[in-house]
Image (cartoon, grey):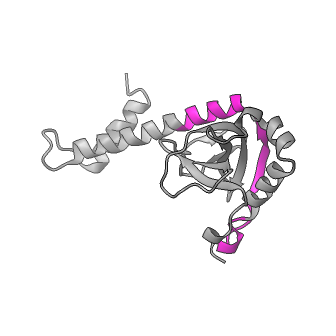
Amino acid sequence: MPRELIQLRSTNLVIIPQTWKSPDHIEHTTSCKGVNDRIDVLEIAYCVAKRVVVVQVRMLSTVSLIDVSETDWEIITIDVKDPRIQKLDDIEDVDAFFPGLLHATVEWLKIYKIPDGKPQNQCACDAKKVAFITDVVAEVHKFWQGLVNIYYFMLKYTNADALFHLSTEEAKNIYMEALDGGTA
């Protein structure tokens, strides 16, 4: 069965744009590198969201998975227009208001890639509170900014029409040296 057909009931699966889980960064809570994509979001849904729509959400919790030895953050949220939002501020509220939903979500996150022939994901840590989530999002946003800066730098200086044309390798070396602080 294709993974697209397997869906956890009462959730919308989306992403946070301008985030990137860097494969060059070892996450201290899991001792694994990032999974090389954006942060995933599971929205506790009162209705199914339309495709390609921007939804403002409140972050409630996060689960850290080990996906084939890489850290993959899954953030649990609720739409700010959801009539139940007044009762939900943090992870404890999710368990109280939706008994069993968080457990079912974690179990689904562990197994949803199995139909694709991939191994089961491992849960790396217990669900975390909102304060922890905001730090994770801020960190992976910085990784995304660095990624965008690398691509911008490479495009700017490897273009054949550039005033100071560099080979791809020269541009990459200069950029990486600048990130490391350069040489004295």
Q: Which residues are magenta?
A: 112-140
Position of residue 146 measured from the top left corner of the image (x, y, whole percent): 43, 37
Out of 12 and 137, give the one closest to the viewer.
12
Question: Which residue lies most toward the bottom here?
Answer: 1
Position of residue 5 measured from the top left corner of the image (x, y, whole percent): 64, 71
Position of residue 167 measured from the top left corner of the image (x, y, whole percent): 24, 49
Residue 118, above or below 123: below
Residue placed at 63% from the left, 54% from the top?
Answer: 12
**Looking at the image, can residue 129 be seen?**
no
Asked which quadrant contains residue 2, the reply is bottom right
Residue 36, above or below 3: above
Query: In the rendered view of the protein, which quadrant contains the C terminus?
Result: top left
Position of residue 118 measured from the top left corner of the image (x, y, whole percent): 68, 69
Residue placed at 62% from the left, 57% from the top?
Answer: 48
Residue 101, above or below 183: below
Locate residue 96 relative to residue 35 in the image: left or right. right
Residue 4, above or below 92: below
Locate residue 58 relative to residue 142 in the image: left or right. right
Question: Which residue lies most toward the front here?
Answer: 83
Based on the picture, tell me whether residue 129 belongs to the magenta stretch: yes
